[in-house]
Amino acid sequence: MFIKSKIRFLNSLSHLLVGVLFSMTPHIGFAQQSGGSKTSFEPDLASMTKKARSILKDKSLAKIKLSVIFQRTKTGEILFSSSPDQKLHPASNTKLITTAAGLELLGPGYRWKTVLATDKYSRGHARNLYLIGKGDPRFVSESLWTLITDAKLENGLKRVDGNLVVDDTYFTPETMAPGFNDKNQDSAYRAASGAMSINFNSVSINIRPGQTVDSVPILRIRPTRHHFNIKNNARTTNAGSESLGLSASAYGDKTRLHLTGRIPKSHRGLTVRRRIDNPALYAGDAAKAFLKRAGIRVKGKVKKGKAPRRIKTLSRLISRPLSLIIQDINKLSNNFMAEQLLRTIGLVHGQAGDWKNGTSVVKKYLEQQVQLTDFNFVNGSGLFGKTAFSARQIAALLQRMAHHKSLQPEFFGSLALSRLDGTLKKRFRDMPQGTIRAKTGTLQGVICLSGYIHHKNGELITFSILMNDVPGRGWLAYKTQDRLLRVFSGYGDNTKK
């Protein structure tokens, strides 16, 4: 226990030091000009707004719906806007709302707990083993292995004479967020949600050619293949190109993987991810496989159920703090983690860990704390559904977080930095690193970007660019956003139309 406490202290100290170093970093810091009401780029403001109007008047944008706003972060002064009150789908810009609400309502130090316990224990033998989930958004294979090895090393767990029971009752039974099933897809970014989940409720499948021509390809599945019914109709070919199709679908309490197509014998292989349909039993099957690997036999079956009130805890795992969890949500745009956070908000500040309570609490937060009205918030990630906000509303939230002294570092630190990390790692390469700190949002026909600009003269600018009904692959939207941000960053718009 002393060692664990010491580790937690050192982790906290490291986070504090990172925060101090972050605040001292001059290049990507967000220092603002002090004193006076005029911005440092005041002489160029008329030229900047003229260029912005010209960019948005391009005929190629005629059928695209836009809601755009740029404003001075320090005072809220609007520098430029175009249809700023038009409600549009913000896609993953919705995560800005979910994470801001999470920070304010739960606090940056909020953590999730996962427990391994038993109802009766004697000499290393557990009658029934209970895997109890509390909604950890980042519980992965390494987390599960730590939980199991701790139970073995600290409490001498050797065998489970009964069943391995997965308790996911911390959240309500529903697993799919509103809008996630609007399209029939098995993509990993549409993952189910549950109080006991592992690996973002997705499975990693490595596919390699068989050893001989006309043999089936080899599938390697992590963390375990015991949860899956595999139908392999693909073939290994002597030559040609790879043409594989892999689908995942519910199969009773498990998931069926169906592989079709062909792969040449010379192919080096590929790895794909698919969502699973039963989070609790998926975690349970993974736990049973890991227990076996640790030399702990489970005699019974993997089942879902509720742990009894009186239990003996064999091990527990405490998650990263929310201040770090939101970095994965925003920098990497993780849909699963955003929905786990929203359900947690609903449980802690509402009546249940579901989307009804989660969205209700966040709506109240937006209305009372951010002073927003007439918006639509249906899930935590912004994946499909009928979510609708305007650029002015997104910017209002960003303004609030920029002026929130105690939470600003955590919120700013969760956003992707241009040319450095996350979804902006490869964008804005003609500007210094960290000039743009923002959240991307991309769906079919929807491309959005909202966040902050560090103007080359030191001024901090809040912006939101929402674009709907975008044709094709979205190159036109990306180009428009890049041009606008070049203008308002002070680095000019040298892009040819």
Image (cartoon, grey):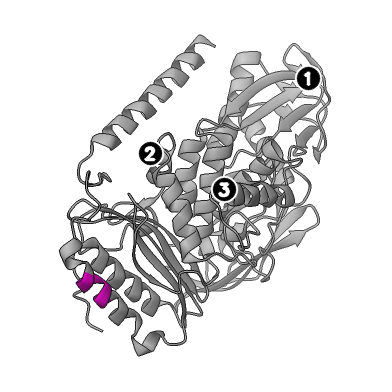
Q: Which residue is mark 1?
A: 311
Question: Foreground residue, 278 or 267?
Answer: 278
Q: Is residue 463 left or right of residue 467?
A: left
Q: Residue at x 19, y 69 (%)?
A: 492
User: Do residues under tags 1 and 3 come within 8 Å of each other at their CB atoms?
Assistant: no
Q: Residue at x 78, y 20 (%)?
A: 311
Q: Quadrant of residue 478?
A: bottom left
Is tag 3's residue or tag 2's residue first in the polypeptide sequence? 3
Q: Amino acid at mark 3?
A: Met
Image quarter (top left, top right, bottom left or bottom right) of the C terminus: bottom left
Q: Amino acid at mark 1?
A: Ile
**Where residue 298 appears, x then y in whole percent?**
75, 30
Q: Which residue is mark 3?
A: 337
Vertical order, 55 against 272 (above or below): below
Number of the front mark, 1 or 3 = 3
Image quarter (top left, top right, bottom left or bottom right) of the N terminus: top right
**Where residue 139 appears, x then y in whole percent?**
58, 39
**Residue 24, which numbered label?**
none
Is tag 1's residue or tag 3's residue first in the polypeptide sequence? 1
**Residue 409, which numbered label?**
2
Magenta-tinted stretch: 46-51
Q: Quadrant of residue 309?
A: top right
**Where residue 156 appears, x then y in whole percent?**
66, 15
